[in-house]
Amino acid sequence: MEAVPTTSEPILTQTEIIDCVEDAFLSGATTVTDLLDAALRCQARPAVFAALVRLPERSYVSVMDVLANLPDLPYTAD
C-alpha cells in the first residue's frame, strides 16, 4: 500500500489578514461584512474567512483594531 502524501496549508498569520483586508479601511471604519468583501476581492484562502467570521459584529477603525480581536495569530509564519 502506498502512502498518500499530505499537504498542510500554511499557517494563517496577521500579515496575511493585513494583506487581504487593508483596502477595506480606505474610506474609514468598516464592518465584518466589509472585511469579508475585501477578502473576497483579494481571493483569500478559506482560513482568512474563518478568522474574519469569528470577529464580533461591530465597527472596526483600523487593521490593528481587527488584529486585536485575533490575538492567537502570529505576525509571520517564521
Image (cartoon, rainbow, N blue to C red):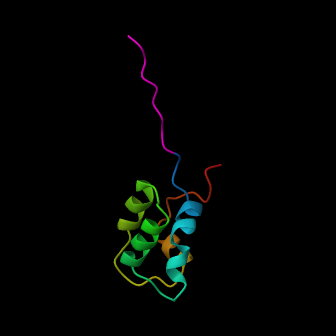
Image: 75 above or below 29: above
The residue under the point 41% across, 84% down is 59
The residue under the point 54% across, 81% down is 62
Q: Which residue is outermost to the right?
A: 78
Image: 19 above or below 3: below
Q: Position of residue 38 (x, y in %)?
A: 46, 72
In this orientation, which residue lies closer to the viewer: 65 or 40? 40
Image: 7 above or below 26: above
The residue under the point 52% across, 89% down is 27
In this orientation, which residue lies closer to the viewer: 29 or 74? 29
Q: Position of residue 31 (x, y in %)?
A: 40, 81
Magenta stretch bounds: 1-9
For residue 19: magenta? Answer: no
Image: 68 above or below 76: below
Quadrant for the N terminus in the image: top left
Report how many numbered discs are placed on residues in the image: 0
In this orientation, which residue lies closer to the viewer: 30 or 73? 30
Q: Horizontal placement of 18 versus 51: left or right?
A: right
For residue 3: magenta? Answer: yes
Per the picture, the main secondary structure of the magenta-coloured stretch is loop
Q: Which residue is outermost to the top?
A: 1
